[in-house]
Image (cartoon, rainbow, N blue to C red):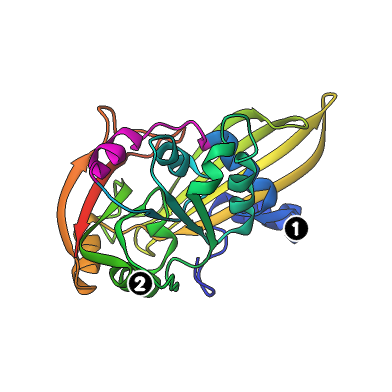
């Protein structure tokens, strides 16, 4: 999210006014990071394709925007050494806590965790393979995205590759399309109590942003004990724009692979999203 960009939009903006600033938190903060892990830890989308594309890679793999380790642990389980970078210390704390879980202790020697900005980092070394997954690319606006690809190029060996798992949202190829919103409701349980969650997915192609917000009501003994609104903004772009961003950094889009057999809907929200794997070379 850019400093001057929209913090919250759509129905979530009205909820923010209703509940006040004290109820608003980041999607990448401490409570939201735990919820993110519960929802995404076992999400298989793209894992098989990423592992297949990575076959034959030597040396450690750099993962940008690693979150709580959905992809990180899949690679560790296959014997890869990993360097996992993320801007959110709360996401990284969840990831590191996973190393204490039964069966994961042995991975500690093969995992290096780095708190850092993917658009401005310097690890002082290069990698044969760099992975960027989820919405990590979209979390950067145009200027940040250009800086990110420049950082990536500097950290890539000659002949090295970048694997980008990307969700392309239908409608963002039409810059004059009207804004629209999707809503979904579900329940979730963490270590303390059940949660009633409402997702608000507000998309505005003309303004070039997507605001993803989750309203949670914590329920204990049938009563709501707390209400929180977690929100974040990403900046999707069409496929051809992403290819131009790659080329501007002196990199080459080597090919696109569609992920999975059912890519029309990959979330409980009724948004047409197509998952792809983009391979980039230096």
Query: Measured from the top left, where is residue 63 in percent x and y?
Result: 41, 54
Residue located at (44% from left, 66% from top): 118
Q: Quadrant of the C terminus?
A: bottom left
Quarter where residue 48 is shown: top left
Instruction: Report the span colored magenta.
Output: 40-56
16 vs 47, nearest the viewer: 47
Query: Measured from the top left, where is residue 120 in percent x and y?
Result: 44, 74
Q: Disc 2 designates what residue?
A: 151
Residue located at (26% from left, 48% from top): 57
**Label 2: element kind:** helix
Residue located at (65% from left, 43% from top): 97
Q: Nearer the viewer, mark 2 or mark 1?
A: 2
203 vs 233, nearest the viewer: 233
Quarter where residue 193 is shown: top right
Judge left or right: residue 78 versus residue 218.
left
| Residue 118 within the magenta-colored segment of the rendering | no
Q: Disc 1 designates what residue?
A: 20
249 vs 180, nearest the viewer: 249
- Judge whether 222 appears above or below 182 on screen: above
- Judge whether 245 appears above or below 48 on screen: below
Around disc 1, counting alpha carbons within 10 Å, would you say few (fewer than 14), some (14 to 19), or many (20 or more)?
A: few
Query: Measured from the top left, where is residue 34 in percent x and y?
Result: 64, 42
First in sequence: mark 2 vs mark 1: 1
Judge left or right: residue 25 versus residue 103.
right
Quarter where residue 271 is shown: top left
145 vs 93, nearest the viewer: 93
- Judge whether 152 appears above or below 112 on screen: below
Query: Measured from the top left, where is residue 90 in percent x and y?
Result: 64, 54
Residue 217 visible in the picture: yes
């Amino acid at each position: 999210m850019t400093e001057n960009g929209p913090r919250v939009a759509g129905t979530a903006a009205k909820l923010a006014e209703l509940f006040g600033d004290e109820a608003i938190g980041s999607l990448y903060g401490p409570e939201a990071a735990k919820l993110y892990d519960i929802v995404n830890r076992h999400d298989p989308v793209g894992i098989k394709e990423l592992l297949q594309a990575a076959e034959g890679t030597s040396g450690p793999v750099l993962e940008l925007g690693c979150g709580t380790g959905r992809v990180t642990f899949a690679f560790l389980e296959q014997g890869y050494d990993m360097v996992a970078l993320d801007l959110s210390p709360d996401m990284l704390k969840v990831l590191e806590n996973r190393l204490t879980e039964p069966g994961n202790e042995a991975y500690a020697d093969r995992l290096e965790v780095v708190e850092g900005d993917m658009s401005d980092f310097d690890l002082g070394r290069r990698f044969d393979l760099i992975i960027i997954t989820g919405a990590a690319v979209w979390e950067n606006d145009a200027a940040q995205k250009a800086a990110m690809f420049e950082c990536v190029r500097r950290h890539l060996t000659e002949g090295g590759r970048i694997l980008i798992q990307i969700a392309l949202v239908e409608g963002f190829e039409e810059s004059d399309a009207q804004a629209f919103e999707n809503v979904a409701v579900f329940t979730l349980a963490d270590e303390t109590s059940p949660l009633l969650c409402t997702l608000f997915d507000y998309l505005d192609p003309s303004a070039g942003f997507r605001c993803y917000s989750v309203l949670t009501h914590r329920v204990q003994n049938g009563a709501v004990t707390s209400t929180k609104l977690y929100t974040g903004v990403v900046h999707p772009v069409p496929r051809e724009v992403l290819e131009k961003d790659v080329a501007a950094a002196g990199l080459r889009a080597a090919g696109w692979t569609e992920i999975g057999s059912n890519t029309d809907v990959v979330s409980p929200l009724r948004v047409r999203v197509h998952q792809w794997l983009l391979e980039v070379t230096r």
